[in-house]
Image: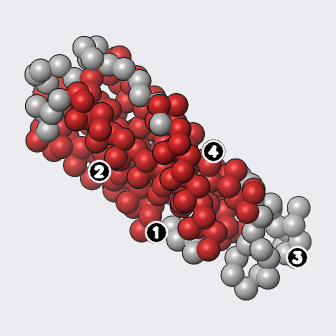
Amino acid sequence: MLKSIKHELKEHAPFTIFGAFTGIIFIFLFRDLSKEVSLELFFVFHPLHVLLSALVTASIYELHACPKGSGKKCNLPLLLVIGFIGSIGIATLSDSIMPYVGEVLLDMPHRHHHIGFLEKWWLISGVAVVGIIIAYFNPSTKFPHAAHVLISTWASLFHILMAKGQNLSGFVYVAIFIFLFFAVWLPCCISDIVFPLLFIKKRSKTGAEK
């Protein structure tokens, strides 16, 4: 498991760096965006992040626990629990909590933690369920995970844009890049890969489950 985690983190680091660079470009392009518009855009990208995260998290579990040809049918209630917690919990950490910590450390003047699941529980819960249902009937991981990383970066970005002051120094841009990278890299890999695999029963060499 540890080797798999290290491998996945290494594989996803370059793409996450690219995503963080796009975030910095967005901050420069949208630096004059109002707090209200930034909040609206946060509630566009954050639900998309939850949708894709739920799809990938549930798909990873289903593909490992109930692979095609095994004759096993996945337990939908369990799939809903894994996808729901894995997507909403980690997306909240990635899009809201970690950016807020960065805003506090950078002493941004309008910092405020926006927790999507609390502010728009009906929307966030709904998209998570949709992602899980899609995974139940058609599990997919590669493209949704790549899109998930980018969308998560942009959700975190617009959370930060709500807190910024009028002018951002070069140091702040570098610091935001670092925060964007870590806010996406670790949580997204944990959500999509590590978390669902924790529920997979180990198999012995004879193929029997332990």
C-alpha span from label 2 to label 4 = 24 Å
Amino acid marked by disc 2: Gly
Give the image's coloring scheme. Answer: secondary structure
Q: Position of residue 157 (x, y in %)?
A: 29, 38
Q: Is residue 191 left or right of residue 80?
A: left
Of discs 3 and 2, which sits in the foreground? 2
| Residue indicated by mark 4 | 85
Q: Is residue 124 left or right of residue 129?
A: left
**In the drawing, what numbered circle is on residue 206?**
3
Amino acid marked by disc 4: Ile
| Residue indicated by mark 2 | 19
**In the drawing, what numbered circle is on residue 142?**
1
C-alpha span from label 1 to label 3 = 30 Å
Front position in the image: 152 or 124: 124
For numbered disc 1, what is the local secondary structure? helix
Question: Measuring 66% from the left and 62% from the top, which residue is drawn there?
Answer: 61
For numbered disc 3, what is the local secondary structure? loop
Say which quarter of the image contains residue 184.
top left
Amino acid marked by disc 1: Lys
C-alpha span from label 3 to label 4 = 32 Å
Say which quarter of the image contains residue 34.
top left
